[in-house]
């Protein structure tokens, strides 16, 4: 079946640098995308979402970019901090109008912040 | 306000047994979804309930079932446990479609 994937299982960056985590999806019907952060021993934590009628959305220190032409999603984290160390997942759902039911998750990227 | 709670947090069962996991959503949330997380398969959708009705179901065998009560609390049941059922089972709640999901801490199930 169709799935959402991430390009890199691990990404190591220096504290204070910007991080970019990428995700490719294959379901052209996807219309709602979410980034989650999961720390060890915890459930996924919502970071930011974007709907298919947008190509960019900004939050606090995070930006999500959506390129529907190549089915690519990215998460940019500005000025990474030690607390940003976690596994990051992208997720998508094809339900029109958005909706988090039946999310399809990518495999995750482990972001490591080096001092 | 209180987040999504899941009980128990840890569970050890033997093959062939059955298990019931519980999830209490955030107050006011009517949608509850369940996910299985394993190192090999990652996060996979099990099923979703809204107003006591199963609206959506992932690709899991019939041994996996669930229900939702009138207060939106949900339970999932796994019968005839297999070693491969060892996983972190996550519950997420939301207001409904079009709204972000909030995850609980999960129940770590180990099948021996």
Image: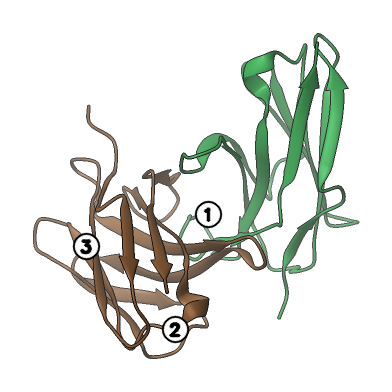
Residue B35 picture location, percent across and down: 46, 63
Q: Do labels 1 and 3 share a chain?
A: no
Number of callouts in the render?
3
- Alpha carbon separation for disc pair 1 and 2: 35 Å
| 3 or 2: tag closer to the N-terminus | 3
Element assignment for label 3: strand
- Alpha carbon separation for disc pair 3 and 2: 22 Å
The answer to whether residue B60 is visible is yes
Residue A77 picture location, percent across and down: 75, 23
Q: Are marks 3 and 2 on the same chain?
A: yes
Residue B89 picture location, percent across and down: 41, 60
Vertical placement of residue A43 versus B37, above or below:
above
Between residues A51 and B13, which one lies in front from this camera angle? Answer: B13
Identify the residue position indicated by label 2 in the image.
B82
Label 2 Cα neighbours within 10 Å, binned few <14 / some 14-19 / many ≥20: some
CB contact under 8 Å: marks 1 and 3: no
Q: Residue B81 carries which label?
A: none
Identify the residue position indicated by label 1 in the image.
A98
Between residues A100 and A37, which one lies in front from this camera angle? Answer: A37
Could you tell me which residue is drawn at 64 percent across and 60 percent down?
Answer: B39
Label 1 Cα neighbours within 10 Å, binned few <14 / some 14-19 / many ≥20: many
**Chain painted green:** A
Vertical placement of residue A55 versus A60, above or below:
below
Between residues B24 and A33, which one lies in front from this camera angle? Answer: B24
Identify the residue position indicated by label 3 in the image.
B74
Q: Mark 1 lies on which chain?
A: A
Between residues B94 and A106, which one lies in front from this camera angle? Answer: A106
Q: Determine the colour of chain B.
A: brown
């Amino acid at each position: 079946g169709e799935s959402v994937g991430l390009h890199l299982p691990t990404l190591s960056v220096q504290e204070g640098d910007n991080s970019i985590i990428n995700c490719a999806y294959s379901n052209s019907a996807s219309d709602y995308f979410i980034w989650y952060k999961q720390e060890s021993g915890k459930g996924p934590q919502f970071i930011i979402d974007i709907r298919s009628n947008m190509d960019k959305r900004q939050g606090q220190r995070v930006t999500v970019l959506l390129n529907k032409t190549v089915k690519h999603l990215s998460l940019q984290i500005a000025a990474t901090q030690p607390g940003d160390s976690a596994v990051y997942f992208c997720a998508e759902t094809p339900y029109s109008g958005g909706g988090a039911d039946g999310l399809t998750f990518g495999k995750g990227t482990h972001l490591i912040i080096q001092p | 306000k209180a987040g999504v709670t899941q009980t128990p947090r840890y569970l050890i069962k033997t093959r062939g047994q059955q298990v019931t996991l519980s999830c209490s959503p955030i107050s006011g949330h009517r949608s509850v979804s369940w996910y299985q997380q394993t190192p090999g398969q990652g996060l996979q959708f099990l099923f979703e309930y809204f107003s006591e009705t199963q609206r959506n179901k992932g690709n899991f065998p019939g041994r996996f079932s669930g229900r939702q009560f009138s207060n939106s609390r949900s339970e999932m049941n796994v019968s005839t446990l297999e070693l491969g059922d060892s996983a972190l089972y996550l519950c997420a709640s939301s207001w409904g479609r079009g709204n972000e999901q909030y995850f609980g801490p999960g129940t770590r199930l180990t099948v021996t």
